[in-house]
Image (spheres, rainbow, N blue to C red):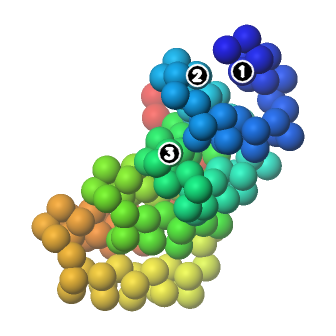
Amino acid sequence: METIEKIRESGNLLIMEGLLDLLHDTSFPEIKKSILNLFSELKNEKSVTLLISAITNEKYKEEQKELVACCWQNGLNYTEYLSVFIELVIHESFLTAFEAFTVIENMYGNIPDEVINQEIIKIEKSLLNTNEEKAYLLKGLLTIIREIPEEQEFLD
């Protein structure tokens, strides 16, 4: 726990891979919670690719929902990975899909129209073959991805 706290203070990205393995391997809930808290407070944009890599890695499937939640909690820019989060909404459990939906809902940045149009087609196709819960999220995405702001918006 002390080591995790020191990493939180220093922000050492080189150690994050080890923390992911510890998150996966430990059976101690307080250690898992502490690591997830650290990931939810990251402020270094370089950590985005590491989190995306973990989220899409089958090894961390058990931690996927929590890692996705860290993405919207830390407020970093995941716009480049819009398609990853849409795939999560489409293919993963409702709880993971909801967390991915929240990441998209909080996205900001300039996304090319071609990418938006591709994702809309993907969402519309998946609407034909999904349950009611997922359909609700997917219909919401059709509106949200058309209105992603270019700059991060802060609410007072």
Identified by mark 1, the residue type is Ile
Earlier along the polypeptide chain: callout 2 or callout 3? 2
Q: Is residue 147 left or right of residue 124?
A: right
Q: Nearer the viewer, residue 117 or 83?
A: 83
Tell me the crowding category of disc 2: few under 14, some 14 to 19, or many 20 or more residues within 10 angstroms, Cα based: some
Judge whether 138 appears above or below 25 on screen.
below
Q: Is residue 83 visible?
A: yes
Q: Residue at position x 70%, y 35% from top?
A: 19
Marks 3/1 in contact by CB < 8 Å: the verdict is: no
Secondary-structure class at tag 2:
helix
Q: Specify the quadrant that holds the N terminus.
A: top right
Identified by mark 3, the residue type is Glu
Q: Pointer 2: what residue?
A: 31
Question: Residue 10's image quarter?
Answer: top right
Identified by mark 2, the residue type is Ile
Marks 2/1 in contact by CB < 8 Å: the verdict is: yes
Marks 2/3 in contact by CB < 8 Å: the verdict is: no
Residue 30: x and y in percent read 52, 18
Q: Is residue 105 visible?
A: no
Q: Residue at position x 49%, y 54% from top?
A: 61
CA–CA distance in space, label 3 to label 1: 18 Å
Q: Residue at position x 50%, y 45% from top?
A: 63
Earlier along the polypeptide chain: callout 3 or callout 1? 1
Q: In the orientation shown, which residue stands out farthest toward the left?
A: 132
Earlier along the polypeptide chain: callout 2 or callout 1? 1
Q: Pointer 1: what residue?
A: 4
Question: Residue 23's image quarter?
Answer: top right
Residue 105: x and y in percent read 42, 54
CA–CA distance in space, label 2 to label 1: 8 Å
Q: Pointer 3: what residue?
A: 63
Judge whether 91 appears above or below 60 on screen.
below
